[in-house]
Amino acid sequence: MGLNIREIVSRKEVDVSKFKGKILCVDAFNTLYQFLSTIRQMDGTPLMDSKERITSHLSGIFYRNIALMSEGIKLIYVFDGKAPALKAKTYKKRKEARDIAQERYEEAKQEEDYSTMRRYSSQLLRLNDEMIAESKELLESMGIMVVQAPSEGEAESAYLCKENDKIYASVSQDYDSLLFGAPLLVRNLTISRKKKTPTGYIEILPEMISLDEVLKELEINLDQLICLGIIVGTDYNPKGIPRIGQKKALKIVQEHKTPEAIFDSLKEKIDELEEEDKFDWKEIFELFKNHDVNNVEINFPKVNYDKVKKILVEEHEFSEDRVERQLDKLRDLEKAGKQKSLDKWF
């Protein structure tokens, strides 16, 4: 679901080569769901092996990350831990949306309407514990660092980017990362380079969003941006305050300045909300300002080629030839890295 402030946040399109030699911190759940929703068959169902185990996420992890690593990018995947209790409302809304999508998917299936089936199928997919564990195992065997966050992955990723100058940016499709204080957010990094539209294919480039530049352009500070997010709706108060869009919310936070003054001006509107949609702004504000995070040492694992093949080829029946061709790219990267280290001595 995530925060929607797209209309008021400026973004800069860049080529993926911009990130060569950089370390990027990836919001793992956000990215894995992206793989599940985009890597699908004609009828919208995910890729599966002969035992009907979903493999779309493994395919995305393997092929797309190797493409990024081949560009000289080093990756850290940050996984969600225990969700805050406030997120219960969001989970309830997601379940309701899945139930509706399931009904419409079944109707389209009976009519053999593949286009509609594909549209609703992406809303039915969920990551289970086995898929998460296997994703971590594959990532580490590819030489990608895995971090387990104590709570929200976006918060942990933002924290690591702030505290460690070796990490260049946080990667996620959601703007929530900015509210957690990510200095630099990258969107559209792991999706396909081309997207099909009614008029043909368009190229999708990575987008960079600088928190400092956003705050400067909007003439607000981070506290005000958090308040703006709460007004339009976050994962902790999905409905926000009805009939207040992004631009109106911006005017409100610019006018009233402090969180207390901002929400005092909106008290009547909040009181008018349905009971299940009411929220304590201070509780949500505190989650964004002081989220539960851990500091970790940056340490990339070595590539384990045999383990990669065991997971993909032996366990899930990926093409051995295709997997080997991709692994050759990792071997070339390793050789280039070793040669670069040797060159320092001459």
Image (cartoon, rainbow, N blue to C red):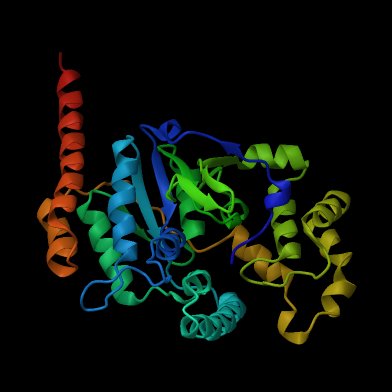
Q: Where's the N terminus, which quadrant?
A: bottom right
The foreground one among 88 and 201 is 201
Q: Where residue 315 sits in the image (x, y, percent)? A: 15, 69
Q: Where residue 239 sits in the image (x, y, percent)? A: 72, 72
Vertical side of 346 occupied by 118: above or below: below
Vertical side of 106 occupied by 236: above or below: above
Q: Where residue 121 sits in the image (x, y, percent)? A: 47, 74
Q: Residue furthest top?
A: 346
* Residue at 51%, 80% in the rendered image: 108
* Residue at 54%, 86% in the rendered image: 103
Answer with left or right where residue 286 lies relative to residue 62. Answer: right
Q: Where residue 273 sits in the image (x, y, percent)? A: 81, 80
Q: Can residue 304 be seen in this view?
A: no
The foreground one among 141 and 165 is 141
Q: Can residue 290 be seen in this view?
A: yes
Q: Quadrant of residue 258?
A: bottom right
Q: Where's the C terminus, which quadrant?
A: top left
* Residue at 26%, 67% in the rendered image: 134
Q: Which residue lies furthest to the front in this view?
A: 111
Numbered-mark total: 0
Answer with left or right where residue 323 lies relative to residue 127. Answer: left
The foreground one among 296 and 242 is 242
